[in-house]
Amino acid sequence: MNDKTRYEILRQREMMKAYTAADVGTEPTDQQQKLPAPAPVKSGKGGMKIPLPLDFENIVQDKNLFALLAERESCRVYREEEISLKELSFLLWATQGIRHFAGKMKQVTFRNVPSAGSRHPFETYLFINKTEGLTPGIYHYIPTDHTLELWEDYPDYEEELTDALCGQEFAGAAPVTFVWSVIPYRSEWRYGRKSHKYMLIDAGHVCENLYLACESIGCGTCAIGAYDQDKLDELLGFITGPSAETDNEFAVYAASVGKKREPSPK
Ligand SMILES: Cc1cc2nc3c(=O)[nH]c(=O)nc-3n(C[C@H](O)[C@H](O)[C@H](O)COP(=O)(O)O)c2cc1C
């Protein structure tokens, strides 16, 4: 290992640590400096919104937590079948759905996943190929009113998405592929230089909820951490490259979803 790599590893290991003596006397966070909090959710583009159903009773299978945990697995082969709008709605609700707003300005969201300081720094984008009633394309989830908005009218995304996901064809061709972006300033505002550890932990919670929610409705998912940052960001229309702007947004995690085959091939 050369000195450059050793230095980078050292720095990244420090990023994984919580508060240490080195933090004493460092600059107060923007929240401590009483700077205004960033918006907790990105508003839509103003296009037509697709309302998502919220009555999930008849789609959730009667499986206890033990069965869900014991059967959870990464699933990369899907049935040639549409996901229903209700199923998609359930997966969005389980991963980023808002239960209530809190705080003086109603600027804090409480959701179905935990997040350090309830900052919830993520946005959800869906590459939809096979979902009941939805034209294939790229959609953005708006959790404030539990709706979807067409983000990009691009039905033939498969080849480009596969390429952006480092050639993982199963994910490019999946009935639905979730891509979570992060808007780092939502967490940086509160936790400053410590926020990056929390945001990555938060992302894990979101995807684990997707695994368990999929398992409970007969769907399967596979987490995707291998992707080309610039290609995926470009596909979603984000500015690529380093940025310290408060509205900087980039892809941070992804997951393919489809109806599970029984039994799932190993
Ligand atoms: C952070 C993370 C990134 C992952 N990235 C990929 C990926 O890019 N492609 C893939 O096929 N699987 C990916 N996986 C799935 C793992 O390969 C899988 O969880 C592991 O093999 C264990 O299998 P299991 O989930 O069925 O228990 C990822 C999982 C995690 C948690």
Image (cartoon, rainbow, N blue to C red):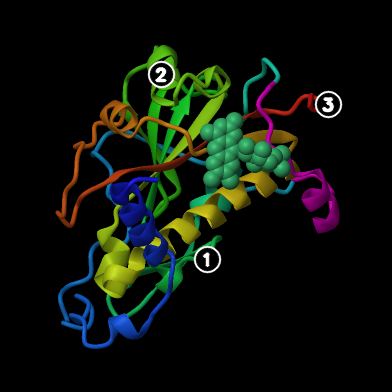
- Disc 3: CA contacts within 10 A as few (<14), some (14-19) or many (>=20): few
Residue that label 1 marks: 114
Q: Quadrant of residue 233?
A: top left
Residue 77, magenta (yes or no): yes
Q: Is residue 157 above or below residue 205?
A: above
Q: Which residue is mark 2?
A: 163
Element type where label 1 sits in the image: loop
Residue drawn at (14%, 54%) of the image: 245
Dot 3 or dot 2: first in sequence order is 2
When asked about the image quadrant of residue 162, the answer is top left
Dots 3, 1 in contact, CB < 8 A: no
- Rendered image: mark on residue 262: 3
Check contact, mark 3 vs mark 2: CB within 8 A: no
Give the residue at x 21% y 87%: 25
- What whole-number distance in Å separates the C-alpha atoms at marks 1 and 2? 32 Å
Stretch in magenta? 60-78
Q: Which mark is residue 15?
A: none
Could you say where residue 209 lies in the image, as x and y percent from the top left? 61, 52
Residue found at the very far front of the displayed protein = 2
Residue 24: x and y, percent? 27, 87
Amino acid at dot 2: Asp
Residue 230 location (% of width, % of height): 28, 31
Q: How far apart are labels 3 and 1 at the CA level? A: 31 Å
